């Protein structure tokens, strides 16, 4: 399992998810500071204006098998143009919301 091996099976950067919250909360005053991205087995049915990260139904390290334990990791990096990281006091807390079809 990916969690047992402590490996990443998929990832995205802010270049990919920039503006992604607008598809879900377009009227939120903080929308430019927010992001929203689906994690799914396939992104084929996801509208092109929404962020989606596909995770293969496969054994680790190529994906996650059914019922595999996993976690999400969030991190900030140095901006290479100014050699500094964001002030932690200016960052909004990350969160994960699990939605399942009824």
Image (tube, grey):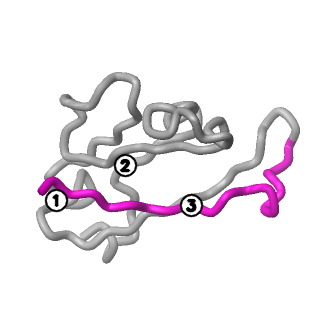
Residue at which label 3 appears: 94
Q: Residue at x 38, y 68 (%)?
A: 71
> In the figure, residue 97 lies in which quadrant?
bottom left
Mark 1 / mark 3, whichever is N-terminal: 1
Q: Looking at the rendered structure, which numbered label has been put on residue 10?
A: 2
- The residue at the point 76 percent across, 47 percent down is 78
- 6 and 39: which one is in front? 39
Task: Give the Cα separation between the discs numbered 2 and 1.
Answer: 13 Å
Q: Name the residue at the bottom extreme.
A: 4
Q: Position of residue 77 (x, y in %)?
A: 70, 50
Residue drawn at the location 83% of the way across and 33% of the way down: 81
Q: In this rendering, which labeled residue sits more in front, label 1 or label 3? A: 3
The residue at the point 32 percent across, 48 percent down is 39
For the N terminus, the quadrant is bottom left
Q: Which of marks 2 and 1 is nearer the N terminus?
A: 2
Q: Which of labels 3 and 2 is toward the front?
A: 3
**Circle 1 residue:** 59
Q: Position of residue 22 (x, y in %)?
A: 51, 32
| Residue 85 spot, x, y in % from top left | 80, 51
Residue situated furthest front in the rendering: 27
Quarter the C terminus occupies: bottom left
Q: In this view, does 88 lie to the left or right of 4?
A: right
3 and 2 marks in contact (CB < 8 Å): no
Nearer to us: label 2 or label 1: 2
Q: Give the range drawn in magenta.
A: 83-102
Question: Nearer the N terminus, badge 3 or badge 2?
Answer: 2
Q: Where is residue 14 in the image (x, y as percent from the top left)?
A: 58, 38
Q: Is residue 46 above or below residue 48?
A: below
Residue 13 appears left or right of 38: right
- Relative to 64, 6 lies left or right: right
In the rendered image of this protein, does residue 34 appear above or below residue 72? Answer: above
Q: Is residue 64 above or below residue 55?
A: below
């Amino acid at each position: 399992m990916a969690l047992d091996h402590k490996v990443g099976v998929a990832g995205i950067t802010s270049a990919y998810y920039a503006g992604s919250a607008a598809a879900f909360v377009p009227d939120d005053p903080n929308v430019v500071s927010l992001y929203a991205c689906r994690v799914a087995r396939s992104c084929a049915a996801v509208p092109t204006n929404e962020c989606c990260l596909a995770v293969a139904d496969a054994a680790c390290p190529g994906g996650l098998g059914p019922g595999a334990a996993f976690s999400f990791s969030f991190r900030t990096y140095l901006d290479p143009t100014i050699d500094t990281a964001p002030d932690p006091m200016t960052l909004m807390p990350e969160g994960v919301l699990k939605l399942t079809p009824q």
